[in-house]
């Protein structure tokens, strides 16, 4: 159960996955962190945990195919079984999708198919919905469109601020993602 986590930002979900592994709740081995933002905070987190880091800068590649092929080579070198997207802000193309069909998973901070794309929490808040939540889904070529694996709802309390909603969503993400990955791994064995 060798996992690669793809992240471009803070890495709080990466952190939650690593903690779940340390606590024995998730029986997996995070072999690689793939990051497309050389300054992202998640890189330092990965170094602290001793996860190998593969930094790939899209600007250094002539095409998306070449960029993704380099990632595939790294995944193959580390014999990765599962690709876990955790705040990776790019669409996955054919080059990566093909060899990892059904083995790439993403987490999104809304109840899909509502509010796909960027700033889903802000979008939901602006829309004034009374219930939102978190979705974990398989990745396909679309933006947050793959088959849904798990969802959990969050109720917006009266006068809840955007910050409070963000915290509530994050709390669910950090519990739901490791638990769902564990279920997928068990089924995939
Ligand atoms: C999360 O809200 C996740 O749902 C979205 O990107 C965010 C990543 O946050 N896909 P972090 O970097 O794990 O803190």
Image (tube, rainbow, N blue to C red):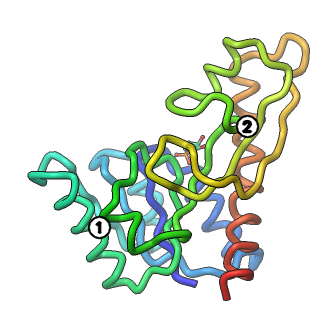
Q: Classify the position of ligand 1 by quadrant: top left, top right, bottom left or bottom right.
A: top right
* The N terminus lies in quadrant: bottom right
Cα–Cα span, label 2 and label 1: 29 Å
**Rendered image quadrant of residue 112:** top right
Compared across the picture, whether 4 is left or right of 29 comes to left
- For the residues carrying marks 2 and 1, which lies nearer the camera in this image? 2
Q: Tell me residue 29's x, y (percent).
A: 56, 81
**Rendered image quadrant of residue 181:** bottom right
Compared across the picture, whether 10 is left or right of 60 comes to right
Compared across the picture, whether 52 is left or right of 159 comes to left
**Rendered image quadrant of residue 121:** top right
Q: Please say if 112 is above or below 114.
A: below
Q: Nearer the viewer, residue 167 or 69?
A: 69
List the residue tagged with mark 2.
111
Q: Please say if 136 is above or below 119.
A: below
Q: Tell me residue 161's x, y (percent).
A: 75, 16
* The C terminus lies in quadrant: bottom right
Q: Please say if 87 is above or below 1.
A: above
**In the image, the residue with mark 1 has its CB under 8 Å from the nearest atom of ligand 1:** no
Of label 2 and label 1, which has the lower sequence position?
1
- Residue lying at 39% horizontally and 46% vertically, measured from the top left: 91
- Residue lying at 90% horizontally and 13% vertically, measured from the top left: 158
Q: Nearer the viewer, residue 34 or 48?
A: 34
Q: Nearer the viewer, residue 93 or 87?
A: 93
List the residue tagged with mark 1.
71
- Residue lying at 67% horizontally and 74% vertically, measured from the top left: 21
Q: Tell me residue 71's x, y (percent).
A: 29, 67
| Dot 2: element | loop
């Amino acid at each position: 159960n060798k996992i690669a986590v793809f992240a471009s930002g803070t890495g709080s979900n990466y952190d939650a996955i690593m903690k779940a592994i340390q606590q024995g709740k998730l029986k997996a081995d995070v072999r690689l962190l793939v990051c497309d933002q050389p300054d992202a905070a998640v890189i330092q987190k990965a170094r602290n945990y001793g996860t190998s880091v593969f930094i790939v800068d899209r600007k250094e590649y002539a095409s998306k195919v070449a960029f993704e092929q380099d990632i595939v080579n790294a995944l193959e070198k580390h014999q990765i079984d599962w690709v876990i997207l955790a705040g990776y802000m790019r669409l996955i193309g054919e080059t990566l999708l093909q060899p990892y069909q059904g083995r790439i998973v993403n987490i999104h901070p809304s109840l899909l198919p509502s509010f796909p794309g960027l700033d889903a929490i802000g979008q939901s808040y602006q829309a004034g919905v009374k219930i939102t939540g978190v979705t974990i889904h398989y990745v396909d070529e679309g933006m947050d469109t793959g088959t849904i694996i798990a969802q959990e709802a969050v109720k917006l309390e009266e006068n809840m601020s955007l910050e409070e909603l963000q915290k509530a969503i994050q709390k669910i993400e950090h519990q739901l993602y490791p638990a769902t990955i564990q279920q997928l791994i068990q089924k995939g064995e």
